[in-house]
Every structure is written in C-alpha cells, then in structure tokens.
Amino acid sequence: MPGAFLYDDVTARAASVTAAAATVPTMPLSNLQDPQPRVRTRFMGSSAAILFDLGASRPLDCVAPLSGTLTASATIRVRLSTADITGAAGDAWDSGVGPAATGDEANGNVVVVRAAGPATGRYLLVEVTDAALSEIDIGLVVAGALWRMTRAQSWGYQEDRMILDRRDRNGYTGAEFPAPALSNPRFAAFETRYLGVSEIATQYRAMVRRNGAVRDVLWVPDTGLSRVEMNLRSIWGAVVQPGQADGMTRTAFPGWSRSWRVVERL
C-alpha cells in the first residue's frame, strides 16, 4: 500500500495532558509536548495511561508514542472519545489491546494506524504496559490525520541508518581511532511519482507551509505493514532542509513527482 505522512500533530497543542501514573519531577509530563524527542517523560511503574484533551473534536487515524524505552513485551491501546472526559469510552475509536512490537532497534517507537481512516473525537487516551520495566520513558506522543498518498514510493528507494560513527586516522602513523556515536539515526530516501493535483494543492502544500524545516513529520512507508515493520521503518523527522528550494516537479501529464529524504530526529 502507499505511504503516508502525519504532518499536523494535534497533541502538541492539546488543551491539557494528564496521566494516571506518577512521573519523575525532573522528567515531567510537560516533556511530552517538548519537540525534542529525547526530552522524555518518565512514568513510574510498568504501565502508563496518558489522556489528551484536544480542546475540540479532531480527526485522527494515527497515534505514535516515540523515543521511548518500551520493549518487545509491551502492549498498547488507543481510545478516542467524543464526550467522555476520561477517554475510556472509546466510542470514536478503540484499537483494542495489542502488542507494541518495538525495542531499541525501533527507538522504542510504536505506530498505531486506524485502517478505516480518520475518526473524530476530543479525548485521546493512550495506554502502554510493559511488565519487563519498572519505569517507562516516552519522548513524544504524536497523533493526527494521515496524508495517505495515492502513489507508493517508486523503486530505487533507500532505507537504513545514517552512520555517525567516526574513524579518525593519524596522518603520520596511519593508526585509526574508532569512536562510536551514541546512536546512528534511521533514514529514508525515496521518490513518489505522479501524485494527483488535488493532493498537491491540499496536503502537500499544507505540510510544507506548516512545518518548513523546523517542525517534524512522521513518515509511514506503507500503511499496510505489520506493526513490527511499521515501527522499524517509520521515521520522525524533517522533510525539508534549511535553504532548500522545495517543490514538486511536473514530470508527466498524469501528475507531480518529488524526491524525499527523511532522517530520524533523536
């Protein structure tokens, strides 16, 4: 299936954020709305229930806790309610309890996509449980309506890691001094061809105008992937670089094309 972008995070401007679990004073709940993923919130215990009052009814079909310490044993449940201030009713959307299917290799990210498309509600409840942990760290919880592209990425795309490790060499002796980076972020480089005029005039323009080079988006390469593959391949990062003359190219009559490069923000 084609990929999708989540470019308008409704939790970042939520009216309030509350949690049932206790947090560490130096890693408070407000960190969930800090744009730097590694400025994390720490929940004491093996479970956390996070409630977002979005302030008004918002459409969304993707929720993703990012930059966390969840392991392969974790589970997640997402509920969206129209009027229940606890979020527990889940009358707009209830994902049910399912495996988080994440770990260090996915940066602890969990991406939950509603196959049926956007649901509309005001109170978003995200519940995570991990019996393997005595405390849970989460950097961000992003949510919103996906731009589901009409075309899949073209053949020739690249995915894996941007290697930040160093191997300094002494110019006189030739000796090498390897220095590992704390992390090598994931990246995706790809092209989408022949996108329709309507999505260029709406979602694409809105994404670039709203986010520019300073705000991040979530790239989901295929909305039909299993959760484990979606977690491993989805990337939170910028889609436009500073100084870049950004734009689509009309390569043929059927539509517009663009090359993308997304590097994970850590």
Image: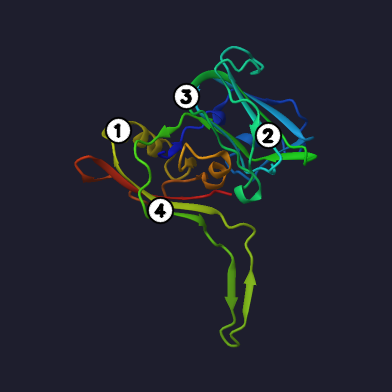
Q: How many other residues sit within 10 Å of disc 4, few (<14), some (14-19) or many (≥20)?
A: some
Q: Mark 4 to mark 3: distance in Å?
A: 28 Å
Look at label 4 and name its amino acid: Tyr
Q: Mark 4 to mark 2: distance in Å?
A: 31 Å
Is residue 236 visible from the viewing direction of this image? yes
Name the mark nearer the viewer: 2 or 1.
Answer: 2
Dot 4 or dot 3: first in sequence order is 3
Residue behind mark 4: 157
Residue visible at 42% across and 35% down?
210
Residue behind mark 1: 201
Dot 2 or dot 3: first in sequence order is 2
Q: Quadrant of residue 125?
A: top right
Query: In the rendering, at what x and y percent does residue 43 appear?
Result: 75, 35
* Quadrant position of the N terminus in the picture: top left
Look at label 2 and name its amino acid: Thr
Label placed on residue 75: 2
Residue visible at 56% across and 18% down?
122
